[in-house]
Image (cartoon, helix red, strand yellow):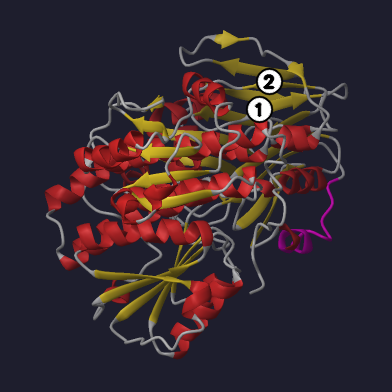
């Protein structure tokens, strides 16, 4: 969810870059920087934390002449959030900013180091600028850039400026968004999304994958993946910043459901090898002497933590317990020093969860936080931190934060499994291959969304909902029920499927809606029997499965998956979209449901 901006023109380049980065803050970041080439000289500024820190560093700096500038807000992937790892990255006479991941960076880096190149950062991005300057020795600037693009593999949006072409900005796009804007003054603006360009540009061109080229004061040159020159396709730019931030979606929650594929890709960046999970932010000694993992959270984070209990015990073979933070802090809990205490929070400021972290620290336990906000209170207090990289989540009802938390827990379970010999090398490799598939399984198709949209009109009345599932699909059922409660104001409960006959089935009638999670690869027959019991009592059944269920009144079919965890993520998207569409039909404010706040910072 990093952000890129670029500018070529006569105005105060520094201020244009800072203003643009400010408009990208909603995407989330942990550091920021700019580089400006003016009158043949570079000025470069970087800062960790919020943009105000970068603004303070640049307060005495002003550009007065024609300049080329690039800027970046970074979510840490390769390397920790430090000034050295912040973008832009420098060569001897060039600077680069980059979103995405360079998959073959390790190979390129070794070759460059063998040639005597020194690296300052831990990032994959830095190889781009050094590779460009290597090619610059034998080629003209744009030829060197073109050659560099053919030599890097992965997803990227790249801007590069160099003293060898001081009146140009080079660009390339593959799998990460980027656009260029123009105005009547002949200026050129780059950004990762529309918002930084609103008020500055009249028209924009959205780059397609494989396109690259350069801009100068009087030219925009674009080549496609076949190296054919193409004309830019300029379209009018929206003038509504809020609408632009929503990228055309009706609600932020809807946008956040759709962008889960991208943010999960960000969560995975730099953390997967063929047979191991790479958490550079964790010291392996964190798990020395640990015989139990205790998870503590509230709300949606509690549900992701509950999912983790299945993964830790199944894969890591480590005893795992789960606590509701608001209850744990008022007990007299027994805490032993062979326990790793893990807190989970989207914001890192949740009051009850923060207090439990303080309790664990006071008791001398090792502590870990799973969080989306760097430099939050929990991140600063815990011994270790794993950032989920979900970007800013504006919808109060969490979607992508939950998805990225579960992905992090899945990876962490495998990381611990390797340390504790819970799984074989081959089993871990198979799990990692499954994790790589998750981004493709959370993509929302038009067909699926339209199907759920039509279904939703049948679920606007009645006396309540049961969301039911077994095993790890029970916490998903709890999360599905919570989503519906939060934004539709309809009563919904999540239950383990096997608990129906222990009381809840007394409520079954045609006005009770049951949302049944039926994974093909995990306890399918048992779960099916539980749903048939509800159907026999005339409950209205909406089944979510890859297998057609003939007792269902409604059926949402997910794709055929090769593992229950992929089914988990497909079903997650279905219950999110179902809750969204029911709320829309009821005329509610999806993003700002009544009585709720995004971050609960009081008891």
Query: Is 172 left or right of 186, judged from the image as shown?
Result: left
Query: Is 157 left or right of 514, judged from the image as shown?
Result: right
Regarding mark 1 in the picture, which secondary structure is present there?
strand
The part of the image, by quadrant, that contains residue 12 is top right
Separation of residues labelled 1 and 2 (CA atoms): 6 Å
Regarding mark 2 in the picture, which secondary structure is present there?
strand
The part of the image, by quadrant, that contains residue 458 is top right
Query: From this viewpoint, is residue 135 visible?
Result: yes
Give residue 149's position: percent from left, percent from top. Answer: 46, 29
Q: Which residue is mark 1?
A: 179
- Residue span colored magenta: 53-63
Which of 437 and 494 lies nearest the eye of the viewer?
494
Give residue 489's position: percent from left, percent from top. Answer: 64, 46
Give residue 228's position: percent from left, percent from top. Answer: 52, 9
Which of 344 and 491 lies nearest the eye of the viewer?
491
Q: Which residue is mark 2?
A: 205
Asked if 217 appears above or below 343 in the picture, the reply is above
Query: From this viewpoint, is residue 159 visible?
Result: no
Which of 116 and 349 lies nearest the eye of the viewer?
349
- Whether label 1 touches label 2, CB < 8 Å: yes
For the point 41% across and 47% down, the residue is: 477
> The C terminus is located in which quarter?
bottom right
Q: Residues within 10 Å of mark 1 (few under 14, many from 20)?
A: many
């Amino acid at each position: 969810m990093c952000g890129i901006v670029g500018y070529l023109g006569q105005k105060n380049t520094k201020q244009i870059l800072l203003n643009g980065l400010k408009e990208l803050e909603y995407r989330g970041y942990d550091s920021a920087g700019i580089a400006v080439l003016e009158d043949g000289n570079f000025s470069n500024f970087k800062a960790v934390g919020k943009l105000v820190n970068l603004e303070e560093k640049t307060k005495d700096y002003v550009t007065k002449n024609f300049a080329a500038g690039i800027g970046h807000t970074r979510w840490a992937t390769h390397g920790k959030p430090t000034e050295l790892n912040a973008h832009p990255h420098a060569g001897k006479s060039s600077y680069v900013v980059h979103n995405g991941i360079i998959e073959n960076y390790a190979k390129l880096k070794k070759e460059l180091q063998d040639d005597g190149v020194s690296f300052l950062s831990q990032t994959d991005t830095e190889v781009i600028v050094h590779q460009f300057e290597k090619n610059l020795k034998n080629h003209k600037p744009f030829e060197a850039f073109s050659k560099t693009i053919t030599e890097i593999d992965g997803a990227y949006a790249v801007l590069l400026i160099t003293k060898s072409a001081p009146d140009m900005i080079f660009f390339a796009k593959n799998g990460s968004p980027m656009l260029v804007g123009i105005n009547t003054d002949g200026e050129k603006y780059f950004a990762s999304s529309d918002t930084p360009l609103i008020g500055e540009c009249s028209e924009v061109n959205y780059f397609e994958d494989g396109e690259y080229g350069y801009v100068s004061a009087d030219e925009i040159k674009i080549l496609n993946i076949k190296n054919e020159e193409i004309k830019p396709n300029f379209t009018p730019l929206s003038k509504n910043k809020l609408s632009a931030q929503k990228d055309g979606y009706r609600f932020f929650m809807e946008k956040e459901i759709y962008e889960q594929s991208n943010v999960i890709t960000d969560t995975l960046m730099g953390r997967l090898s063929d047979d191991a999970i790479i958490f550079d932010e964790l010291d392996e000694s964190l798990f020395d002497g640990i015989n139990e993992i205790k998870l503590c959270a509230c709300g949606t984070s509690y549900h992701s933590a509950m999912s983790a209990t299945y993964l830790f015990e199944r894969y890591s073979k480590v005893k795992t317990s789960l606590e509701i933070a608001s209850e744990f802090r008022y007990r007299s809990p027994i805490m032993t020093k062979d326990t790793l205490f893990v807190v989970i929070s989207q914001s890192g400021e949740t009051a009850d969860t923060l207090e439990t972290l303080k309790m664990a620290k006071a008791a001398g336990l090792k502590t870990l936080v799973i969080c989306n906000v760097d430099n939050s209170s929990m991140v600063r207090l815990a011994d270790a931190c794993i950032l989920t990289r979900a970007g800013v989540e504006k919808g109060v009802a969490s979607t992508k934060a939950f998805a990225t938390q579960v992905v992090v827990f899945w990876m962490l379970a495998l990381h611990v499994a390797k340390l504790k010999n819970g799984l074989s090398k081959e089993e871990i490799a198979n799990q990692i291959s499954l994790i790589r598939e998750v981004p493709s399984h959370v993509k929302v198709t038009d067909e699926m969304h339209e199907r759920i949209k039509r279904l939703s009109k049948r679920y606007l009345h009645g006396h309540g909902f049961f969301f039911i599932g077994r095993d790890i699909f029970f916490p998903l059922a709890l999360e599905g029920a919570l989503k519906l409660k939060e934004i539709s104001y309809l009563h919904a409960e999540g239950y383990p499927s096997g608990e129906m006959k222990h009381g809840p089935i007394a409520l079954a009638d045609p006005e009770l809606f049951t949302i049944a999670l039926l994974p093909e690869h995990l306890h399918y027959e048992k779960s099916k029997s539980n749903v048939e019991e509800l159907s026999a009592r005339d409950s209205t059944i909406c089944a979510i499965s890859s297998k057609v269920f003939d007792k269902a009144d409604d059926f949402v079919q997910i794709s055929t998956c090769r593992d229950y965890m992929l089914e988990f993520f497909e079903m997650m998207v279905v219950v999110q979209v179902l809750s969204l569409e029911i709320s829309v039909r009821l005329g509610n404010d999806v993003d700002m449901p009544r009585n709720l706040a995004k971050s609960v910072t009081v008891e």
